[in-house]
Amino acid sequence: MIYRVILVANGKYKKTLHRCKTKETAFMNYHLLKEKNKVFYPRKFLNNNGIIPVKYQICVSKPTEEGDTFRLLRDEYGKTYTEKPLGDWTILASDDYEIEETFWIYGYDPKINRPTITEVVKKLMVGAHAKKMVKQIIVVYNKLIIHNEDQFDMVICKNTEDAQRLHHTLAKIAKKQKIKSLLFMGTSSDVMVSRMYDEIVLETGWDIKKVRRTTTRP
């Protein structure tokens, strides 16, 4: 008998986090992994044939055998149902789990070099304490722009909601650090969008069709 602690995304198997031969060891590692799950900025969306919300869970599983008792759960409406096996595995326990989000920052390879929010904060803080240094942070659909006369950084998020969440998180960090040289402008108006598109084209050399994309959906 092989017990596994697995990661599940929207009810589908993602990967095995631990495998062992006893139920006791599986549950010990399950609780240990939950305790260590400290995430600063959790992922909320997946780019999987479209941009979709994601819910991660960590589960203890075993191979399904005749006579297994399956869990009785409640759906989002409070209605009870009997859980089905996950493939050929029976789920013994599960709990919510978080994955640290990574970002496509302009100038970085979006496939092999995706920094966490720590790197975004570093971009935000460059020169933030200098006198007369003011930077604007604005959401342009799925893009978060950090800019002034001397700096242009762009974080391409999965969709507008993701970019807005990043904007609000950075604003909270700046407020906590008491940094007043950062102007958080929120979501750009229709008039501002056109001006920001021009700046993005100027700074990146991207084709305007690429700039106008509002999600990272392929």
Image: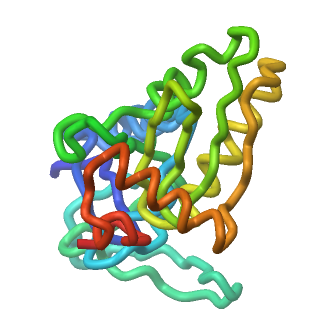
Query: Residue 206 appears at what percent x and percent y?
Result: 26, 56
* Number of numbered discs overlaid on the protein picture: 0
Give the answer, above or below, for where 89 lies relative to 146.
below
When asked about the image quadrant of residue 174, the answer is: top right
Q: Nearer the viewer, residue 125 or 10?
A: 125
Residue 182 is situated, as x and y percent measured from the top left of the image, at 72, 30
Q: Is residue 95 above or below residue 73?
A: above
- On screen, 146 above or below 189? above
Can you say whether 84 is above or below 96 in the image? below
Q: Position of residue 93 (x, y in %)?
A: 46, 57
Residue at image coords 66%, 90%: 79
For residue 59, say whether it is visible.
yes
Residue closest to the eye, 141 or 36 = 141
**Colour scheme of the picture:** rainbow
> Is residue 35 something one can see in this rendering?
no
- Observer-nearest of 18 and 133: 133
Q: What is the residue that sits farthest to the top in this orientation?
A: 130
Front in this rendered view, residue 42 or 211: 211
- The answer to which quarter of the image holds residue 38 is top right
Quadrant of residue 134 within the rendered picture: top right
- At x 65% / y 70%, what residue is drawn? 191
Image position of 84 (left or right of 62) = right
